[in-house]
Image: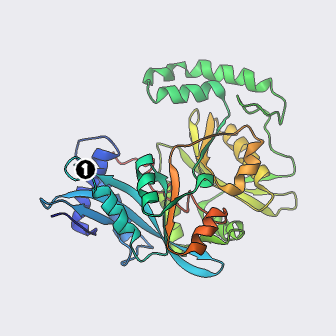
Amino acid sequence: MSEIRSLEAPDIPAIAGMFQRVFRNDKTPPPTTLTDYMRELYLDAPGCDPEIRPLVHVNAEGRISGFVGVNVLPMTLDGRQLRAAICGSLMVEDRETDPMAGARLLKAFLAGPQDLSFSETASEVSTQMWTRLRGIVLPQYSLDWVRVIRPATFALSVASNRIKLARLANPLAHGLDRVHRKRMARGQQRWSAVPDSGTSQANYTVTDIDKAAFANLLPSLTAQFPLRPNWAEEQLAHILHDAVQKPDQGDAIFASVAARTGAIVGAFVYYARSGGIGRVLQILALPGQAGPVIDGLIDHAAARGVAGLRGRTQPALLEAMLGRRIAFVHVASTVVHARDAGILQAFRNSQAFLNGLAGEHWSRLIGGHFD
């Protein structure tokens, strides 16, 4: 008879092996670096809660055949302290033998003592399981956005993911982009590209900062959200430490945006690799300042040779994005579950700060390198 129980340290090698096979599509033994990281992430990292643990599914033969990763995020709703549990790495093997293992894992996770549970990477199958267990989908948090900066290089970057030899055309693509972007007037809005002269307003200044300075800006730049993270200093430092260790995505760039008065109105962090598509981890903006912050991000990335940008939506940014030739695509859903109707209403009303640092995309399991 199968069972579901909390993850224990001796389970980690089996979990790392399953992750290697399911998510990395690699049947070779997992590298030691991956095993060590999963132990740290799920058992030893600051913020781990002994009452809210990752879960394993053990089949009738006594072998681990399923897993749901769990990270705990302290949050506050109008001053009320909450414990949120982030669901990540939901995976099951031998579905033919036990097709309901995934559903049982998710049900056991949602029955935990946390005040709310969520995931920002739910697949279509996972989303169906969440909704059957009274979870809700948050469409306004469930879109990825894309902004093309250098069209030829952007197309080549996408093609090279499938056809490695496509990279040989890089010099031609760069030349075409230079000609196209120089013909555009400053501030001109096109779907195809961003002007070589930029789009930012003269009244705002973008300044590179370090991760510690970025962490110091988080409280003031998220205070507008009634439901928001309440990270302990040690936990936030650990998250940002992990977030910068993604060499496959490029260098992690932190920057602040200031008005002419010198007042900070926003900040952002993204991964930059010349000729690649930069992944935006987080955009922060004071109310009414999202437009200048987004412009600053796009120009900042363009100056570093990035072909385009991709990130996850926040409802507070959507209005400003609509006028900036940004495209939207649905890749995975953000889903949430809570027994308290007031918590769910805050999500429905777009009053929650969610995704990115308040989610899963900071983890090295998404875009990290372990070989």
Residue tagged 1: 93
Residue 261 vs residue 106: left or right? right
Regarding mark 1 in the picture, which secondary structure is present there? Answer: loop
Residue placed most toward the observer, 291 or 215:
291
Figure check: 131 above or below 321: below
* Residue 108, image x, y percentages: 34, 68
Residue drawn at point x = 87 percent, y = 57 percent? 260
Q: Is residue 230 visible?
A: no
Q: Locate the C terminus by quadrant.
A: top left
Residue 57 vs residue 224: left or right? left
* Residue 349, image x, y percentages: 67, 64
Residue 256 vs residue 109: left or right? right
* Residue 218, image x, y percentages: 65, 67
Residue drawn at point x = 28 percent, y = 68 percent? 7
Residue drawn at point x = 82 percent, y = 33 percent? 188
Residue 64 vs residue 34: left or right? left
Residue drawn at point x = 68 percent, y = 24 percent? 177
Residue placed most toward the observer, 189 or 232:
189
Q: Amino acid at mark 1?
A: Glu
Q: Is residue 302 visible?
A: yes
Q: Within 10 Å of the Cα at label 1, are there few (<14), some (14-19), or many (20+) other Cα atoms?
A: some
Q: Please, which residue is most extreme toward the bottom here?
A: 80
Q: Locate the N terminus by quadrant.
A: bottom left
Q: Which image quadrant for residue 278?
A: top right
